[in-house]
Amino acid sequence: MLNFFEEVALPVSIGAFGQQNTMINAIGVLTSGGDAPGMNAAVRAVTRAALNKGIRVYGIRRGYSGLISGDIIEMSARDVSGIIQRGGTILRTARCPEFRTEEGLQKAAEKCRELNMDGIVAIGGDGTFRGAADLSRHGIKCVGLPGTIDNDIACTEYTIGYDTAMNTAMEMIDKLRDTTASHDRCTVIEVMGRRAGYIALNTAIGVGAEAAIVLEENYDLDEIASNMLATKKQGKSHFLIVVAEGVGQTDVIARELQEKTGIESRVTVLGHVQRGGSPTMRDRVVATEMGYYAVELLAADKTDRVVGMKDGKIYDVDIQEALSMQKAFPERKYKMLYDTAF
Ligand code: F6P
């Protein structure tokens, strides 16, 4: 396959890390864990940014399992045409238990050496970064990019896919409001987030829900029920309650609210629909910025870094430090939801 560089003149490459005369021959890019809208935009940015520096690019299919099995294709600039607007990931994704074993890691590192692949950009969540850190111990330079709809990665304010997922949830819940209002009901909506309530909280604010029930905060159904009854007396006729998947009690919550208030309460689980769809402008732009930055890091011979966003700017942090950080739940925002809900 023709490399982009056999067709066009090499542009001068001056990045965030200065003029680069890179020793990197080739890099791989993979997506791992749950897919997220915007991953394709990141793959596109990584591919083109690297090719424009004279670095060959391999697309590794199905995350780390493709690296072990050799399910790898060399990518040209044209291979990533027309994907910036597509949801999912053209590289596919998988979770790979074998990669957690020494044998699996050795096979993967061997495959990288076979292809002269000096570095890898791994797009995913904390599990993906742990894999990248392990692989780098075997001599392969690794940079992680945060891609998950949950926005639950501590070292970054923002993860690729979050905005799209919340907008999808918002559109769905806006539709649910129509029917909830028509029937004077309460709808309890379960949104994604096995370990994190960020989607639930922000979506609840965005749709004007009465409550967000999340793992990070204690909740009191008696209090929610009495607020519902008090505002019903003042004329409020329907209610929206958003529950994070990780709470795991959505049916029970709806049943108890119905028993406590006498208001008919139904459950809707939004599920994986939130992981699909065309990425929003924000996800496309952030994914492109992060992908571009990751290539600059590798070209500057850096390894064990995670690209993130801090104070609205793209930055990088040591991978072990990133993995040890804790993300605080936005207490003030949570309080604000309740202070503006009824
Ligand atoms: O990618 C994050 C996420 O969508 C979580 O919100 C959810 O709990 C989990 O993945 C579901 O994973 P799977 O698709 O493997 O069931």
Image (tube, grey):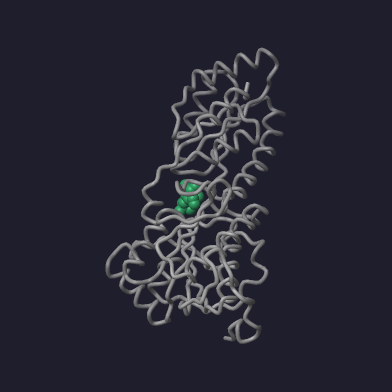
Height in image: 333 above or below 65? above
Depth check: give the residue in front, 26 or 41.
26
Residue 302 drawn at (x, y percent): 43, 66
| Location of residue 63 (image quadrant) | bottom left
Which quarter of the figure is the C terminus placed in? Answer: top right
- Image quarter for residue 116? bottom left
Q: Residue at the location (48% across, 78% down)?
A: 26
Residue pictured at 51% horizontal, 27% vertical:
255
> Is residue 67 depicted above or below 178 in this figure?
below
Q: Residue furthest left?
A: 102
Q: Quadrant of the N terminus?
A: bottom right
Above or below, 139 relative to 261:
below
Q: Is residue 273 left or right of residue 64?
A: right
Q: Nearer the viewer, residue 29 or 90?
A: 29
Residue 75: % across, % down: 56, 77
| Total tally of numbered discs in the picture | 0
In the figure, 34 relative to 139: above or below? above
| Image quadrant assignment for residue 176 | top right
Q: Residue at x 45, y 69 (%)?
A: 120
Identified at 43% across, 60% down, the residue is 305
